[in-house]
Amino acid sequence: MFYRSLKSSSKLVNFEEAVKKGLAEDGGLFFPQKIKKLKKEFIENLEKFSNIDIAYEVIKQFIGNEINENDLKNILTKTIDYDFPLVDIEKNVKTLELFHGPTLAFKDVGARFMANCLGHFNKKSNKLNTVLVATSGDTGAAVANGFLDVKGTNVVILYPKNMVSEIQEKQLTTNKKNITAFRVNGTFDDCQQMVKKAFTDKELNNELNLTSANSINVARWLPQMFYYFFAIKHLKTFNKKIVFSVPSGNFGNICAGAIAMKLGLPVDQFVASTNSNDTIPRYLSSKNYKPKKTIPTISNAMDVSNPSNFIRIEEIYQDFNELKNNFSSYSFDDDKTINAVKSVYKNSNYILDPHGAVGYLGLKKFLANKTDFIGIFLETAHPIKFSNHIENKLNLKLKIPNSISKILTKEKIFTDVSTYSDLKKILIINQKKN
């Protein structure tokens, strides 16, 4: 498999190069040169296969000859060694729980897959790689966990000051070892802009072997396809149209879903459910792509005004009318989000996190007056991460998982930065110390 830049198609790279580079030399996102549909018999019989076998069939064409079958299956075994339950909420409404991994968020799959792939490639290299990642909350935690002690890898996490939950910040800043956290005086979009600038900074790249673990990296982005195949495996029905509602911030997860559809998965519609950061809902109604200043919300992992992965979605659908026919997007503010949390708990005895609540709202809006669809929304994080918003509203106390309780007393270690030049200076100094 070869990958091309979405800014130009002049230079192709293989999977290993795409993973290690993160972004193309021209600053563009990598995209598969071609996508081959999976066999219809395989998709119609998903319930007969293990999750590892499904993941292998789904991802192998995107790896090519870079990793052999045994090693790839070993990587997948280390990546998806936990459950992905599909839970009934209401008639024709189900949720796919993606928070049963080590950091209690859906980002665990992509982060672990990328970490294991990079670890595999590093076996034949003595180079030190620096993984640079911007996070609005859960990405950084998953990347820190996935890359902790990975050979030949240092991880640098940028997160926005006062815009992640206390538990998320603990997950970002208490790892030590090969994980370094920077608290940025700005928004996630500011963090992401620093990352992008770093990749096009020739002086910095002469000092560091940079790669990114955001969903801009193909090894972080593509494994998210697995979720949609696992959901259909659980569903075991093809007698209704299927719609997925995805809480969307940087749009990597829903973009992976669109790739799954291109592989032949029977998905009829996607709903990109956003919080008050409504760039894409406005774009689909006006054809005017105009990001505004990022608005902080209780669903902070989605506080993104200029989603990097949307360009990949446009590449998948090619035509604006095709996009609108198969892709809807709705925005919901914090009041509607909390009301959804309360309503679902009252009616279904199920506790949503704020991101899942946004996904639920988008699904309900799409399904209004439709009886020929069955809908699945993604629950992307454990509610405990947002206990300050959940517990008071529901008048209950959430049980703290062991993976969280053991970090709550740890000291947070981070460096404050305000500008890209500050970040660059520190990175070069630290590199010379190594």
Image: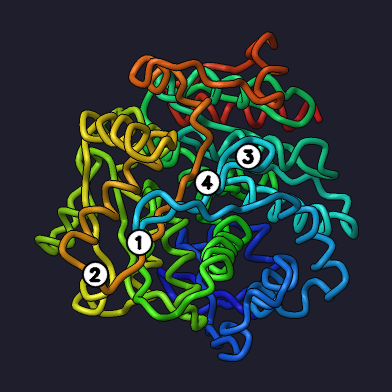
State yes or no: discs 1 and 2 in contact (Cβ < 8 Å). Answer: yes
What secondary structure is marked by label 1? loop
Rounded to the nearest angstrom, the CA distance separating label 4 from label 1 is: 50 Å
The amino acid type of the residue labelled 3 equals Ala
Based on the displayed image, in which of its 4 quarters is residue 14 positioned?
A: bottom right
Q: Secondary structure at mark 4?
A: loop
Pinpoint residue 146: horizontal percent, then vertical percent.
72, 42
**Rendered location of residue 242, percent (x, y):** 37, 71
Residue 201, numbered circle = 4
Q: Which secondary structure lies at badge 3?
A: helix
Observer-nearest residue: 412 or 158?
412
- The residue that label 3 is drawn on is 142
- Where's residue 302, x and y in %? 37, 40
Camera-nearest label, 4 or 1: 1
Pair 3/1: label in front = 1
Of tags 4 and 3, the one toward the viewer is: 3
Question: Is there any visible trace of residue 161 in the rendered image?
Answer: yes
Q: Amino acid at mark 4?
A: Asp
The residue under the point 49% across, 30% down is 383
Looking at marks 4 and 1 on the same chain, the residue that comes earlier in the sequence is marked by 1
Earlier sequence position, callout 2 versus callout 3: 3
Which residue in the protein does label 2 denote?
Answer: 371
Mark 4 in CB contact with mark 3 (< 8 angstroms) = no
Q: Which quadrant does the C terminus fall into?
A: top right
Q: Which mark is residue 92?
A: 1
